[in-house]
Image (tube, helix red, strand yellow):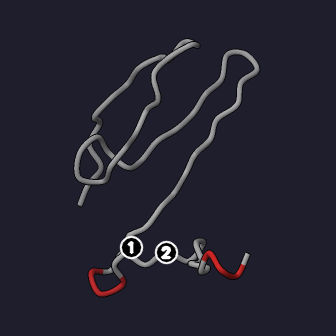
Amino acid sequence: RLAKLKVDTVLTAPCETAVLFPTSGGNLHCFTAVASCAVLDVLAPPYAESAGRRCTYYHDHPYSSF
């Protein structure tokens, strides 16, 4: 699948939380700051190895292991 542009916008604080889903809203993103800022970028499962969507930088740990 080729990537398609879904949103090209400038967010100014304060702003609403932005959420991206692979099936609606896109899943490729880029941040460019014009001033000091903080970004929390959360990657969460589900990943599907059987569908070719393997994640090598995320490890699932049971909550009890913390």
Q: Which residue is mark 1?
A: 47
Which label number is shown at residue 5? none
> Is 1 above or below relative to 38?
below
Quadrant containing the N terminus in the rendered view: bottom left
User: Which residue sits at x=67%, y=16%?
Assistant: 34
> Is 22 above or below relative to 33?
below
User: Which residue sits at x=56%, y=78%?
Assistant: 60
Q: Which residue is mark 2?
A: 55
Distance from disc 1 to disc 2, alpha carbons, whole Å, reads 7 Å
Q: Are marks 1 and 2 in contact (CB under 8 Å)?
A: yes
User: Which residue sits at x=33%, y=49%?
Assistant: 21
Residue 4 occupies quadrant:
top left
Q: Nearer the viewer, residue 22 or 15?
A: 15
Instruction: List x then y, in percent, for residue 63.
Output: 62, 75
In the rendered image, the residue lying farthest to the front is: 64
Judged by depth in the image, the label closer to the viewer, 1 or 2, is: 1
Q: Nearer the viewer, residue 3 or 40?
A: 40
Q: Of helix, strand and loop, which one carries label 1?
A: loop
* Amino acid under disc 2: Cys
Instruction: List x then y, in percent, for residue 37.
Output: 71, 24
Badge 2 crowding class, 10 Å Cα cut-off, few under 14, some 14 to 19, many 20 or more, is few
* Amino acid under disc 1: Tyr
Q: Of helix, strand and loop, which one carries label 2?
A: loop
